Amino acid sequence: MPMLLSSVFQQLYNMADSIVAGNFAGENALAAVGASFPVTMIFVAIAMGGSVGCNVVISRYFGGKDYRNMRLAINTSFISFVVLSLILTVFGLIFCDSVIALLNTPENIFADSSVYLKVYITGLIFLFVYNICNAIFTALGDSKTPLYFLIASSLGNIALDVLFVASFGLGVLGVAWATFVAQGVASVLAFFVLLRRLSKLKADNKEKAPIFSFSMLSHISRIAIPSIIQQSFVSVGNIFIQSLINGFGSATVAGYSAAVKINTFCITCFTSMSNGLSSYTSQNIGGKKLKRVILGYKSALVMALSFCAVVTVVSLTFRDSLVGLFMNSPSDVAIQTGSSFIIITSPFYFSVAAKLTTDAVLKGGGAMASFMTTTFSDLIIRVIMAFILSPFFGIYGIWWSWPVGWIISATISIVFYLRGNWRPKYARNLKLRHLTDS
């Protein structure tokens, strides 16, 4: 539940930028922030995908009470994350405008999109540091501390958004700097609190853990790289879809930007629950308690589907109002675009909730090939269907590509779980019913 609340505040953090931009700087400002969204999500995907690998490995050592290797994994993760963030910052700033141009971004919002994206890229190191701290806290069984930082950071971001945009009139630039400052403060504070927490964990032997290990990096990478590829592949696919939507004009882009924020809010909540299940799965496999993995999966699935029912009803009932939150004087085209997206996609949230929950067990068990297969099938089908259907059904054809991809990939993921792909090697010859009855 703390991870779910963290996800809620994380999305409020992201949504605040769009809401303030749309209400105080106009529909074009909202469209500019929205047009940058798929690119920013690539960086978020890399940070989150990498943190998944760190989380699974650290959880396994923590579950087995191997504190020396746990510390080595933490040290290696931090150094690797900082170096990676600096490399991405350099390349991001160099190719920022080229990427925006490739997205077929409308000319009237190009400059604002560029400004927002460049400031966001400058703060990538804060994004990466916060995500690795969050992953380590969760691996140690503490999901409350990241929540406290996120609540404070979210409220600070909203306050700075209003100050910079409504009071100082900085427009999209103010929105970008608000995110930069709030995320920077949160990441620095999280880092020092984590250091203090780790100082209380004592290793079984007196030998000090090394600062960095290439073998440990390789171990983490076996989980992290597939997760990064998976999350980045999804973001790249969204870029292709965004390029299709950009061709319908800035009003349509604004409506989609509002609706996709709501969609991302819901799906990220499912993802946060699945991340908790991944840590839980890895810890219990490390402790050789496979029965608890099965019981945990069933419990998490009930939680996810229950939450899914609530958000689906709320989304459908208040769809026009939710889209309107992001704009001061929304056009009919923007409202209609956002509402149609919600009407088509939200009834199928149950399928993506089932997929993400099942994927969590596959990740926690180290079955990365199975995990990547389910994700790639979702994305490939979604992108292909969007390009096939849009010439015949316009924007609605793009919307229908989401449910089709979710349903097929969820089915594949459940099949992998039932086959027991998540089980460790020592238990591969056991049947699932034997594990349940043991």
Image (spheres, grey):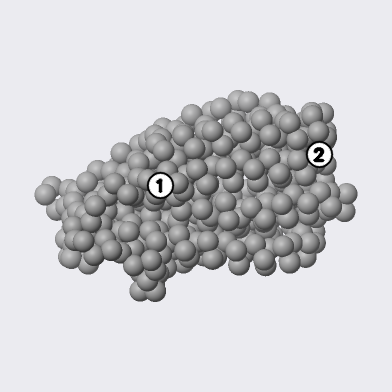
* Relative side of 357 to 27, left or right: left
- Provide residue 64's location: percent of width, then percent of height: 21, 56
Q: Residue drawn 72% across and 30% down?
A: 162
Q: Is 404 rendered above or below residue 308? A: below
Q: Residue drawn 52% across and 33% down?
A: 151
* Relative side of 95 to 106, left or right: left
Kindly identify which numbered label has been placed on residue 170: 2
Crowd around label 2: few <14 · some 14–19 · many ≥20 (10 Å)? some
* Relative side of 357 to 69, left or right: right
Kindly identify which numbered label has been placed on residue 308: none
Kind of residue at disc 1: Leu
Q: Is 220 rendered above or below residue 242? A: below
Q: Is 192 rendered above or below residue 42? A: above
Whether pointer 1 and pointer 2 mark residues with C-beta atoms closer than 8 Å, the reply is no
Q: Which residue is mark 1?
A: 194
Residue 345, picture quadrant: top right
Q: Residue drawn 70% across and 38% down?
A: 18
Kind of residue at disc 2: Leu
Helix, strand or loop under label 2: loop
